[in-house]
Amino acid sequence: MSANKPLPVVVLISGSGSNLQAIIDATQRGELPVELRAVISNQADAYGLKRAQQATIPTEILDHAQFSDRPSYDKALQTLIDQYEPGLVVLAGFMRILTPEFVEHYLGHMINIHPALLPKFPGLHTHQRAIEENENEHGATVHFVTSDVDSGPVIIQARVPVHPEDTPDVLAARVLEQEHKIYPEAIRLIAEGHITFVDNQAIYKGTALAASGINSAIN
Ligand code: GRF
């Protein structure tokens, strides 16, 4: 994680990969000191695989349907990931629940982006739920992955307004635009060594970040 040595990164996806694209773009612009070693998908038709191929990043498909249970899939996934010796595993729309053993193996070295202001709205259909619950703000969260789903110390959040006329799709698009900014930013902070994971906390400049992450330290 020194300033001179790029951080090796493996990205896991299941779908479109627009966050992956934002990470690729930021890396190609020279903004992230990372080496994107591989993109792995559990879905053979994930569009993100094409994005990776266009950027000449090695791709792998590991289809969960070929495995009888979650532990055996996660074990195979771990073996595959570790062949690339990543310092950071980035979950970018990887639509799988992970076993505690898998999470433990990468503890402090695996991050996720979730389309809500955690701890609000873990799980699915976050945009619809934010509208139904009359939230006036919504957003996205990048966090270290710990064994609770959509939990773990927050690194950074982006907030957007919710307008009365919003549909879930309109709100999702507003949030996604922010995801594409905060995910590369979180990766940069980790790759440059500014954010670390210690004792189940995200540490920034020697201090544990508050529940809303880096914004609370900067503002
Ligand atoms: C994003 O909304 C992300 O927050 C969630 O899954 C979606 C992935 O989108 N975890 P994409 O594949 O990066 O376009």
Image: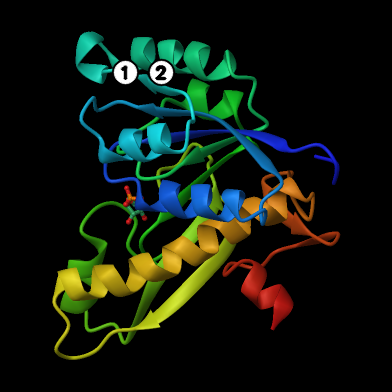
Which residue is at the front of the view, 30 or 179? 30
Q: Nearer the viewer, residue 159 or 191?
A: 191
Q: Are marks 1 and 2 in contact (CB under 8 Å)?
A: yes
Q: Is mark 1 on a helix, strand or loop?
A: helix
The residue drawn where x is 33% and y is 17% is 62
Q: Which residue is drawn at 66% across and 51% down?
A: 32
| Residue 199, x across and y down, in percent | 73, 43
* In the depicted structure, whether residue 203 falls above or below residue 54: below
Q: Which of 43 and 109 is in front in this view?
A: 43
Q: How many labels does the image show?
A: 2
Q: Mark 1 CB in 8 Å range of ligand 1?
A: no
User: In which quarter of the view is residue 130 placed?
Assistant: bottom left
Identify residue for label 1: 70
Viewport quadrant of the C terminus: bottom right
- Evaluate whether residue 96 shows in this view: no
Q: Which residue is drawn at 70% across and 64% down?
A: 209
Q: Residues within 10 Å of mark 2 (few under 14, many from 20)?
A: many
Residue 189, disc: none
The residue beneath circle 2 is 74
Q: Position of residue 205 (x, y in %)?
A: 84, 62
Q: Which amino acid does label 2 sit on?
A: Asp
